[in-house]
Image (cartoon, rainbow, N blue to C red):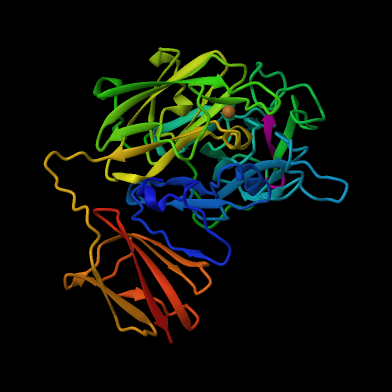
Amino acid sequence: MHLPAVMDGGPHQVIPPGTTWKPYWKVTNNAGTYWYHPHLHNMTLEHITKGIGGFIIVRDSAESALNLPRTYGKDDLPLVLTSRRIDASNQFVVNNTAYGDYLLCNGVRNASVTLPKQMVRLRILNAEVERGYNIGFSDNRTFYIIANDGGLLNSPVPVTRVKLMVGERVEIVIDLSTATLGSSIDLKAFNSGQAFGFPGGEPATAGQFGSLLNNMDFNLLHIVVGATTGTPVLSLPNSLVTNTFWTAAQSVNNRTLQITNGNPGPNPIPFNFDNTSFNINVINKSVKLNAIEKWTIVNNNVFGHAFHIHDVEFKIVDRNGSAAAVGNYEAGWKDVVFVPVGESVSFVAKFDDYADEVHPFMYHCHFANHEDDGMMGQFVVVNNIAGLSINNTAPVYTLFPNPAHEHITILHKGAPARLYYAKIYDAVGRTVLMLPKPDLSQGLDISDLTPGLYTLELTDDISKLQSVLRFQKH
Ligand SMILES: [Cu+2]
């Protein structure tokens, strides 16, 4: 999502046990289907496998003005697709497993649903570790793509198949209005016979890159046609929204990232960018606030990858240097793009609104195993204003009342302090509260804390210098 980096929850934002982290932001993304999950480095595969994640469905006035199915659970269903391997103790296998053996749709095996005899919208997320899906229906019918990762397309795109890689979302509409009541149809992955480099096309049925679902067609969701609802949508609008995309000609900075092999050796790191594996202490790229940039991801490696970038939605402008090679199924705003083996993809994005020299945003392969192994980098968006004088002394804060019960007021020169971050530690040094950019106009809310002595670590919003104060909660 487009939000301040300090609210983004990247690998830097560890939430210790027993701690509450309170990010907040104004949602400015287009209406669309988004999702969240933890981003602790080296832990993404395990966290996603164990099921921590969820959808964020954004609505807005442009989408609401259209005659589209949007009744949640009736004619508008989010579908999270993934698969799991299960061990002899009926536990999810976490280690050395790129592909599961059993497909789960919204956490259910052999999922089935009754959908009304009318236009129905499916918001599909690929939440796999690595597997891609070549999605279609058992009767090979035409369906309509209405949205990519970052919102509605200009107009519905008719297809019979759409490839969905890890992290990607697609909103589709299917027309069940002419189907026979009680008949059924299957949403399927047509994954047999894919070109080499399609994740899940490998022939093996066991081992790290094997799976009982590899290189075959399998069901995602069994659909039974039920009765029409009271106010059905029976046709699709010819046009949806008018997107204004950034163009390659507007780019002020072109970057190229090579997908490369990591260091071979006893503990090999399979993939990275520009021969550099992720290092939490290294900022890989610096982008100027408001810059429009073109990034080209070149994959002269041995397998396909799903490139994802935080903060922005981008427009794919070429594949292998050809604008015509960009599919109309991926013509909208995107934040994940598949880069097949031996190919390159260019996209253009504008890095607006949020500058922060301390907290970075991430870019990475969205295959969780690749990301965990170091196929990730970080960038800061910087706002270099000439002549800006940075105060490099820490402000002196006033704290009252102290002891306090509900709220504690933090003032700097008589006004509410402007903080980049506030952290509260208990008497034994445990972090209990982490507050990025807290609004201190009403004071700091300490009502949830148990009585005791606390340490307050305040990071100034301008100088980023830290001050430590103590208070008592009664
Ligand atoms: Cu990858």
Q: Residue furthest left?
A: 387
Residue 161 left/right relative to 152: right
Res 167 → quadrant: top right
| Range drawn in magenta | 181-190
Task: From the top left corner, tell me how far across and down residue 65 is, in percent.
Answer: 35, 49
Q: How many marks?
A: 0
Q: Residue furthest right?
A: 88
Res 305 → quadrant: top right
Residue located 16% across and 40% down the image? 385
Task: From the top left corner, tell me how far across and down residue 82 is, in percent.
Answer: 67, 41
| Above or below for 250 versus 105 | above
Q: Quadrant of ligand 1?
A: top right
Q: Nearer the viewer, residue 33 or 92?
A: 92
Residue 187 within the magenta-colored segment of the rendering: yes
Residue 386 within the magenta-colored segment of the rendering: no
Q: Main secondary structure of the magenta part?
A: strand
| Above or below for 118 versus 327 | below
Residue located 80% across and 32% down the image? 212
Task: From the top left corner, tell me how far across and down residue 218 is, in percent.
Answer: 74, 33
The C terminus lies in which quarter of the figure?
bottom left
Q: Is residue 198 visible?
A: yes
Q: Is residue 237 visible?
A: no
Task: From the top left corner, tell me how far across and down residue 282 is, in percent.
Answer: 43, 36
Q: Nearer the viewer, residue 14 or 355?
A: 14
| Above or below for 1 versus 327 | below
